[in-house]
Image: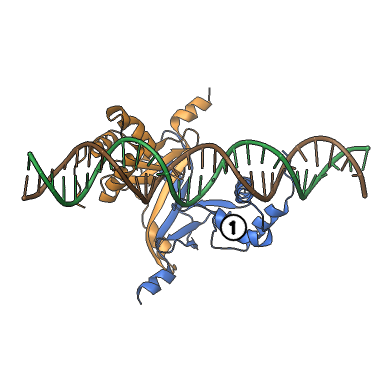
Chain colours: A blue, B orange, C green, D brown
Amino acid sequence: MALKYSRQREAIKEFLCGRKDHPTADGVYMEVRKEFPNISLGTVYRNLTLLADLGEIARVNVGDGVDHFDPNTKLHYHFICRECGCVQDLDIDNIVNINEMANANFDGEIGGNVTYFYGICGKCKRRQRS
Amino acid sequence: MALKYSRQREAIKEFLCGRKDHPTADGVYMEVRKEFPNISLGTVYRNLTLLADLGEIARVNVGDGVDHFDPNTKLHYHFICRECGCVQDLDIDNIVNINEMANANFDGEIGGNVTYFYGICGKCKRRQRS
DNA sequence: ATAAAAATAATAATAATTTCTATTATTGAT
DNA sequence: ATCAATAATAGAAATTATTATTATTTTTAT
């Protein structure tokens, strides 16, 4: 199936690329809806999945039971706040040779790993003090 | 609420402790059902959640959208096969000071991290060659 | 043995996501 | 520009994992 252009898909990608808060499918839906009032949630899901499969965006699992989407497909780590649920990028170097460590005395073959951090974000931390 | 004994809960824990394949709630349900034919899935969920909250078992997220449960509550790492979906324990040392690394130049406060590995398990790897 | 409190079974409800289908939009060829 | 093919859409229904509700049954302290 030879992938045709669609302005909905374009708008979804456009919107996501202007964001660094890792929205969910529903978050994307709510916003893109302003430009395409009768876009359907199914279309948002389908296109997010398609873009992720094409490698143009990344699907991010931060353990809250909802998929988030990230325009940055380069390897980096995420932080999720247990208080407000926000997702942020972390500025740390890659965790080196962790896959090789895991591969030692392992029967199968390690392809990669998923790592994310949780805790309390700066905003919530400051709010707690008041 | 003063936690009363229940043979369903006992059976659930018993079953889980005899396992090292990290079953899901539904997997537990299917098995415990053999002993308690009219146990309900809700009871399984409620007790797994209760046992996890008590710290007697661990809830494990391996990114497949389903919660798995592990009788081993000590910190260790998991591998999930992209082929068959099986979950296995990995025998590696703790990833040292990864939280501290993340905390450096981070606004909030890192409480911990979730890390799991994926790839192809030994069984599936061997099956592919044939 | 009894009664209060907790746990259960069965079912309904919810949330995230996927699938289905009839209609619409895109595209490559005329 | 027109036309057919086929991919994409909207809207709705279906699915999956999980949680909540409620009437009934177990457990346990007296």
Output the chain of dot 1: A
Would residue D13 appear left or right of A81 to someone viewing this image? right
Identify the amino acid type marked 1: Val
Viewer-nearest residue: B61 or A40: A40
**SS at badge 1:** helix
Name the residue located 34 percent from the left edge and 34 percent from the top edge: B29
Left or right: where B11 falls relative to A119: left
Placement of A110 over or under A20, stated as above or below: above
Say left or right for D5 vs D27. right
Counting from the top left corner in percent of width and height, residue B16 is at 29, 36
Residue A4 or B123: which is nearer the viewer? A4
Please identify the quarter of the rendering in which residue A1 is found: top right
On the question of residue A21 being in view, the answer is yes
| Residue at 27%, 45% in the rendered image | B51
Q: Is residue A14 left or right of residue C7?
A: right
Q: How many marks?
A: 1
Which residue ends up furthest to the bottom in the rendered image? A130
Residue at (56, 63) in percent of width and height: A20
Q: Nearer the viewer, residue A86 or B94?
A: A86
Q: Which residue is mark 1?
A: A28
Is residue A105 visible in the rendered image? The answer is no
Q: Position of residue B34 (x, y in %)?
A: 31, 27
Q: Using the image as rendered, state which of residue C27 and residue C10 is in the foreground.
A: C10
Q: Tag 1: Cα neighbours inside 10 Å, few (<14), some, or many (≥20)? A: many
In the rendered image, residue A38, in percent from the top left (x then y), is placed at 67, 55
Examine the rendered structure and indicate whether residue A37 appears above or below residue B3.
below
Place of residue A35 in the rendered image (x, y in percent of width and height, measured from the top left):
68, 61
